[in-house]
Image (cartoon, rainbow, N blue to C red):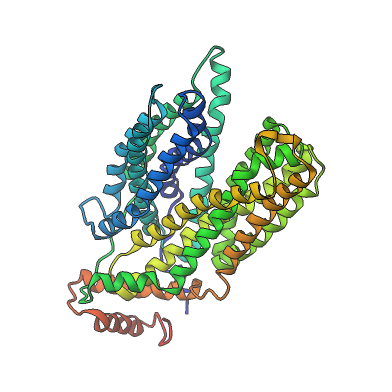
Amino acid sequence: MSNPADAAPRTSLLTIFAFGAGSLPLAALNIAMAISVQPYFAQTLGVSLITIASAFFTVRMLDLGVDVGLAILMDRTKTPIGRYRGWTVLGAPILMLGVYELFMAPKGIDGGYLVLWLLVYALGSSIVGLSRSSWSATVVTRYDQRARFYGYLTAIGVIGTLVALATPIVSGLIWRGPHNNVQIMGWTILAFTPIGIGITALFVPEKVSVDAHVHRPPLADYWDLVKRPEVLRLFFSSFALTLGPGWMANLYLFFFIAARGFNEPTAYGLLIGYVVAGVLGAPLIGWIGGRFGKHRTMIAATVLYSLGLCTVTIVPKADFWAGLPVMIWCGFMATGFDLMTSAMMADVGDQVRLEQGKERMALLFALTGLSGKLAAAGAVIISYPLLEAVGYVPKLAGHNTPAAINGLVMVFIIGPIFWVILGGICFLGWRLDAKKHAGIRLELEARDELLVRGATVDGGAFELEAREALLAQGVIGDGIS
């Protein structure tokens, strides 16, 4: 019998790259918001740190439940252009409006201005990000190809990140006089957003799955989905694997400048090496995940990342070329975290649709999005108080006591390793492997075909008819699912 995974056709690279085009502006936007915009509000526009922190915290709290509500609407949407494509197109102008008002904000803005336009930005970002994540799961359905597909998307996103990081450098070469790097980043993102999302919307097909007729109330399905072991594992692993690298990012400059003796430019140079590693690392890890199993690849990546981070304290201080391979190694491994989580959640989405008869992909990705948002907040809430507890004072930079520097090193190393290893442990005993997923896809496709032909049976009887059709064709055995 041939391998069932080979039954589905391969997705062309042109389709993959067309979908990835939408990742470029989104990745550039994420890094610009994380690194440049908040300091811009404080240093250039004169907004107090308390006002900035309060505005971002308020929006984050208001935003927590938005993704779940949007996901329920998206999964129920059916339009002539697809289930998720329309949402992506709808979210783009909302996102662009928020970007314009934040990146081009005038002097004299207050907390109310920030809250309003951060809410618009968050809404647009949630619509575009969630619809793209859900749509991505329908572009590639084969177990092995799905891992490679998310690897390509991650690599393309890294290129977008590099575009944002390079903008200040390029603008400095072009304009010798005073210029506003944040506004230049904003205009770059505003230009690329309609182009990238437009390419995706025009050239990537979206296969809308056929819903079965079921009599269970949606709330029962939602509760069954939330308590599924696979969903809980992915939720907690996503939280841990976001919090660990986020913890490292929050303490990055403190550690490399105060504890390792680097100056700011060389510290950023190491960071670029960490990011660039993802261009090669993401596709390769995706290939490994498709070949040897996504859960095994994830466990290996978390262990190897942690071992690499331990060696940061061994290499000579202030030696850029000695530290660069370590950062490339860690960056290489870290790129596997998000892509494998997405690929595995897409597999779970197929399993859920087979059992419930309805598309729940957006809701599943909303749950991992929620875990990421909680982790991003937790990285600051947990790491900064610990840093204060060990006596490290950021404003003293390299003039802290030896005990405080040692405390900084311990917090920087132990925190990320703890969370990353915990994220890897979540996949011990994972059962949704390539063989099981292949059977799920075959049953789904058989059931969809029956629905398209006008089958009217419901629930378990419908699943029984689909399995009988597969058994009659000799495609599956009695114990495939």
Q: Residue 227 location, x and y as percent?
A: 40, 73
For the residue pair 318 and 74, the one nearer the viewer reads as: 318
Split into 4 quadrants, where in the image is the C terminus? bottom left
Residue at point 22%, 71% (across, down): 451
Residue 461 position (above or below residue 301): below
Q: Residue 101 location, x and y as percent?
A: 35, 29
Residue 392 position (above or below residue 173): below
Q: Residue 475 location, x and y as percent?
A: 39, 79
Q: Can residue 194 be seen here?
A: no
Residue 209 in which image quadrant = bottom left
Residue at point 63%, 38% (across, down): 272
For the residue pair 210 and 100, the one nearer the viewer reads as: 100
Q: Residue 315 location, x and y as percent?
A: 80, 46
For the residue pair 463 and 471, the one nearer the viewer reads as: 463
Residue at point 36%, 49% (across, down): 63
For the residue pair 8 and 78, the one nearer the viewer reads as: 78
Residue 273 position (above or below residue 372): above
Q: Can residue 421 be seen here?
A: yes
The mark tally for this picture is: 0
